[in-house]
Image: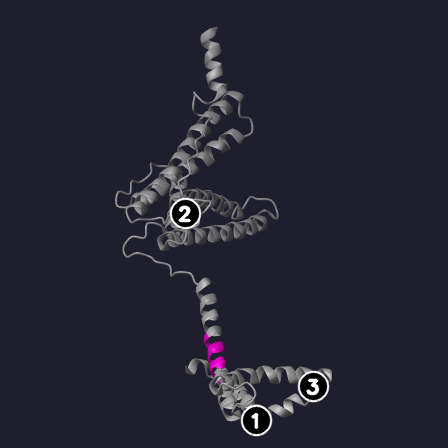
Amino acid sequence: MFRHWKRLVAGVVVGLFAAALTFNIDAVERLSSSQLIGTLQFFGRVLLVPGVLVSMAVSRNMHHFPLWLAALGNLAFWIAAGRFVGVLVHRLREMKKYSAWQPPVYVPEGPRMIEAAAVTGLQDECTKRWHASAGPVAAREENEWLDAVERQHRANFDLWHIEDEARAPGALDAEVARVKRRVDETNQRRNDLTEELDRILVTWLENRGLPRATAPLNSESPGLIVDRLSILALKIYHTREEAGREDAPAGHAERNRERLAILEEQRSDLAGCLDALWYETLAGTRRFKMYRQLKMYNDPSLNPAIYGKVSQIRGG
């Protein structure tokens, strides 16, 4: 009750005014008919109506009724009206607050599966290590998710440097053709591993009754975000390298420092999106699906440039 005291006080004031006006009901009726007075007269009548109706009903007389009873009725009615308006406004505010409410992010105890900082840190560490010595990918049996993240990043790492071979000045056509085939094979591996990232997460979520089927669908899956983070890690590494080149022409270092700042900001934003998507998925307020890449260029049964050529050779 005390939460609505302001409206309750307003109701008391209006009620007292209406009660006082009730005892002067004849004066209200005799007021001038000017526009301003007429408006005040109308509102005065509105204030008096509830108590007058109560007094008429109790006395069962429409022409002669106790003014004290009408005044008491008006006082009670307008106090109750103030109270009612207070409760109604409070309820409407609560409904508005509830409609804008978002459930708290739920992060289960134990391994969180996805943590963007761990993903970007691993990608940076691997990029640096492989440039020093391009050895095999280290198996991470204790963490299937990070193991898949590293293998997917290695596919992007290999793809980056294979494509550079085709861009080398003086590369022969035969060499470019061989590189193109390696690019296709490596890109297929990259896409397969991106799907594997999502497959691991979907399995993990299904065992916990997630994602919630009624939650809004995110257009991008975590695997696709990790793939973009992988490419950004490679860009950041090579841009940082260029920014530190001592034999570079004037302005080269400054230009690459500017590019580096942009790339790092983009990666920070994207990493935040990955964390947000995962936490919202755990909270049941968002979901994602595993989207298959379904590449056609490496499939002999789907690429007419392959099966058409094979048919020509066989026919010849």
The amino acid type, in three-letter code, at marker 2 is Asp
Asked if residue 160 can be seen in this view, the reply is yes
Q: Of tags 1 and 2, which is closer to the observer? A: 1
Which of these two is toward me, 284 or 136? 284
Tell me which residue sits at (47%, 77%) in the image.
84
Outermost residue, left direction? 142
Residue that label 2 marks: 124
- Which of disc 3 and disc 1 is earlier in sequence? 1
User: Which element is circle 2 on?
Assistant: helix
Which of these two is toward me, 192 or 128? 192
Which of these two is toward me, 114 or 35? 35
Tell me which residue sits at (56%, 92%) in the image.
20
- For residue 218, side relative to residue 35 (left or right): left
The amino acid type, in three-letter code, at marker 3 is Ile
Outermost residue, top direction? 316
In the rendered view of the protein, which quadrant contains the N terminus? bottom left
Q: Of tags 3 and 2, which is closer to the observer? A: 3
Q: Of tags 1 and 3, which is closer to the observer? A: 1
User: Which element is circle 1 on?
Assistant: loop
Q: Which residues are magenta?
A: 79-87
User: Which element is circle 3 on?
Assistant: helix
Residue that label 3 marks: 37
Asked if residue 6 can be seen in this view, the reply is no
Tell me which residue sits at (31%, 43%) in the image.
203
Above or below, 180 relative to 212: above
Residue that label 1 marks: 23
Residue 10 highlighted magenta (yes or no): no
Q: How far apart are the alpha carbons under marks 3 and 2? A: 81 Å
Name the chief secondary structure element in magenta.
Answer: helix
The amino acid type, in three-letter code, at marker 1 is Phe
Above or below, 82 relative to 25: above
Q: Position of residue 258 (x, y in %)?
A: 56, 51
